[in-house]
Each structure stands twice: as C-alpha cells, then as structure tokens.
Image (cartoon, helix red, strand yellow):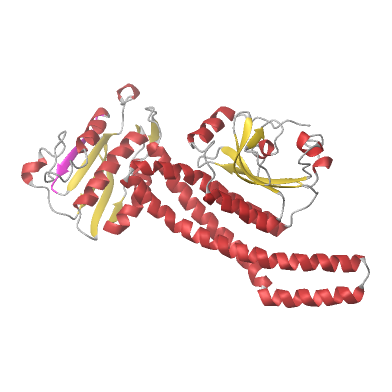
Amino acid sequence: MLEAPVPRNETERLTALRALNILDTPAEERFDRIVRMAKHIFNVPFITLSLVDGGRVWFKSRIGTESTGGPRAVSFCGHAVVHDGLLLVPDTKKDPRFADNPFVTGKPYIRFYAGYPLSNTTGFRIGAFCIQDTVPRELTGEEKKMLEGLAAWAELEVNLFQCRQLASIGQLAAGAAQEINNPMGFISSNMDVLGRYVSDYGKVLVMANHLKESVQEENLPKAKSIAGEITKLEEEINLDYILGDVDNLLTDNQKGIERIRKIITNLRTFAREDRGDLELIKIEHIIEAILTILQGEIKHKSRFRKNYGDTPFIQCNPQQLGQVFINLFLNAMQAVEEDGVIEVTTYRRDKNVCVDIRETGKDIDKQNLDQILDPFFTAKAVGQGTGLDLSVSREIVKKYGGDIQVQTTTFTVLLPVEKKRKEVPQ
C-alpha cells in the first residue's frame, strides 16, 4: 500500500485549511444536500465531503458511515488532494496504491473510488468530494461532469463557510452577501435542473443496461423492442436537448462560482490578520477589490463612475489602504442623495499617486472642512452615532508620507510613488 503523499506546500496548505475555521463543526444542511444529490445520481453506498488535516481526514458531510473521519495515511482522499483533477480508481484491487489498503481488504471493502480535490480561494487543496462503492465500476463522460459539478458546488460552500463568518464585519459583509446571493440563486436553480436531467438520464441508462443484457443473451426480438422503447423515451425527455444543456448549466455555474470566489478572495484580503506585509501594487487594484465587496451596498444607493489614469505601482500594505478606501467610500455613500453619483479618479501629480473621491451630495459645511478629519469629529446629531472615523484613514495615509485633503464634496488621497521600506507603517 502506498501511503497518502504529503504535498510540498503542506505547511501553507494546512494554514489555509485551518483559516477556514470549518474543521470539527456541526453538520449543516447546505453540505448534506450536496451529498444526498450525489447519492441520487450515482447510487453508491459511500459519499463524503472530506477535509484533509495534518494526520487525519475529517468529514464535513457523509453518507454510508457513522465515522467522522479517519487516518490520513490510509485515506483515498489524501491521494486526491495531490492529484490534478479527478482521481478515478475503477478497481482498487488492481491498483498497487490501494490493493492492500485496510479499507479494501477489510470493512468497508472499497472496490471503487472517484474524487475531485477541493481548493480554497487562493488555490490550496484542502480536501476532496468523493464517491465510493463496494464493487468495481467505471464512470461515463457525463457522470464525470456531474461529479465535477457537485465537487464545484461543495468547494463553493466550503469557501462560503468563511464568508458567512466574515458577516461580523457588518455593513461591508452585508453588501458582499447580497452580491453572493445573486450567483448563488442561479447556481441553486441550475442544480435543481441538473437533478431532473440526471433522473431522466438514469432512466435511459437503466434501459440501456437491459438492452445490453438482451444482446448478450442473443435475444434479438427483445433487444429490438427495448431499442424502440429507448428511442421513444429519448424523444419524451428530449435527451438531445438535455445533453447539450448540461454543458450550458455547468458553464453558467462555473461563472457564478468564479464571481463568488472573487468576492470571497477580496473579503479575505481585507479581513485577515494584518502583519504589515508590503506589496508592489497599483492603487486601482485595491480600489477595484473594495468596490467588488461593496457592490451590494452601492447598487441600492448610488452609482460609481471610475476614471482611472496611468498610475505607477506603489509599495504599500493593501489591507491598510483598503481600510482607508472602505471608510471613504462608505462615507461618500452616506452623504450622497438617492441614486446619486460617486466619481473615483486616479492620476499622478508630481511624485504622488492621487485618488479623488467626489460625490454629488450636499457640500460639506465650510465650518466643518477643517475639522472633518480630526479624531472623534462628527457632524451627526446626538444619538445618531459618531460616524466613520476618517481620522484613522488620514493617519494611515500620513504614515506612508501622504495625506488626505478635503474640498466641499471631494476627498483626495495622496500617496508618494517612492517610499522607503522602513518608513512604511507596520
């Protein structure tokens, strides 16, 4: 038996897995329904949504076993996380990696395995979605697509697990959650349709097996009769359309998953522990990431116009500057009138990269212009809150040698193009 190999990036992979905070959490319907769908499609005794931890495999959802996991060294999923794409083992006794595996030679006597690796939003493989049987079998091309679709759905839910935890960051996550709900809606709808397609396709497969048996028995009249029934069934369920539409549904789902992956990635970028790491990055990339997260808030209150210039890279901590723009954008959205416009313009002025954030709301009172960036200042009435602490944003920018300037309806962020590493805030 070949023990499950350990990938070269094991330390980083484990960090990524544990950062999800999903290990050893209770069962959840959103995961269990994916496993039930796999049971309906493939009719196998064992299905697991497995996460591969240091020395163990833990099941977030499962069918066919009471166990919540097992040793990683003898697990099939331990092999899946280091395999590119589908790990398919038609007959475990004929595969030297698994022929003498204790789960093959003893209970539960696994003879077939198929599993797709699951990754987090940054690409680390954290587990696998797999099906297992006690008899050897193969998967058709369509069945492989179905399994891939279910694995993508499982991967999405695993990553969304952390996104739901990030809801505690309040308004920011609320807007992102609204944006996630849109693709989640059509993904869920598409999976319902795929379920019906699988049911119809299963009927054809059953009849095809009967036809195969008739041919093997050399019972030509029976074979002709079954062939006619298959043709009739194909017309009733419109099989040609189903086969064509499956690709469309999976493509749409993949687009939705990529949209959600982008939102989650941006959320994690600005919600993770700040270690003061510096990166060379264009300011527009930080702005785009923040606007993606805030999209749910934006579309219900205002419209954004973006005028990006040809600005150079700057050395900065994206988390810190991201927080600056979160504060400034939310401040602008509070000030803008219903269906107002917020303009974001980037450009270079001398040795600075500049960002103008202008909104079409009411002008800032002249008496407040000199105080609006001071600590604890607010123009709100007593009892309506203290507002967003724009002074924090200014302090972050000042530590980079820059500044924030205010003019009536416009905030301008100035950041120096050249900055020595030791001067950057940690």
Question: Picture coordinates of residue 112 (x, y %)?
Answer: 76, 46
What residue lies at 42% left-to-right and 41% top-to-bottom?
A: 165
- Taking the magenta stretch, the answer to whether it contains residue 402 is yes
Q: In terms of depth relative to the viewer, which is nearer, 258 or 79?
A: 79
Image position of 340 (left or right of 114): left
Q: Could you tell me which quadrant the N terminus lies in?
A: top right
| Numbered marks: total | 0
Magenta span: helix, strand or loop, mainly?
strand
**Could you say which quadrant of the image residue 117 lies in?**
top right
Question: Picture coordinates of residue 297 (x, y %)?
Answer: 31, 53
Question: Picture coordinates of residue 291 (x, y %)?
Answer: 34, 49
**Could you say which quadrant of the image residue 328 lies in?**
top left
Q: Is residue 308 above or below residue 300?
A: above
What residue lies at 24% left-to-right and 61% top-to-bottom?
A: 339
Q: In terms of depth relative to the viewer, which is nearer, 38 or 149?
A: 38
Image position of 16 (left or right of 109): left
Image position of 351 (left or right of 194): left
Q: Is residue 354 visible?
A: yes
Pick out the residue farthest to the top: 422
Question: Picture coordinates of residue 304 (x, y %)?
Answer: 29, 55
Pick out the residue farthest to the front: 66
Pick out the residue farthest to the right: 218
Q: Is residue 285 visible?
A: no
What residue lies at 77% left-to-right and 43% top-to-bottom?
A: 110
What residue lies at 10% left-to-right and 42% top-to-bottom?
A: 369
Region rendered in magenta = 401-408
Image position of 401 (left or right of 363): right
Q: In terms of depth relative to the viewer, which is nearer, 22 or 255?
A: 22
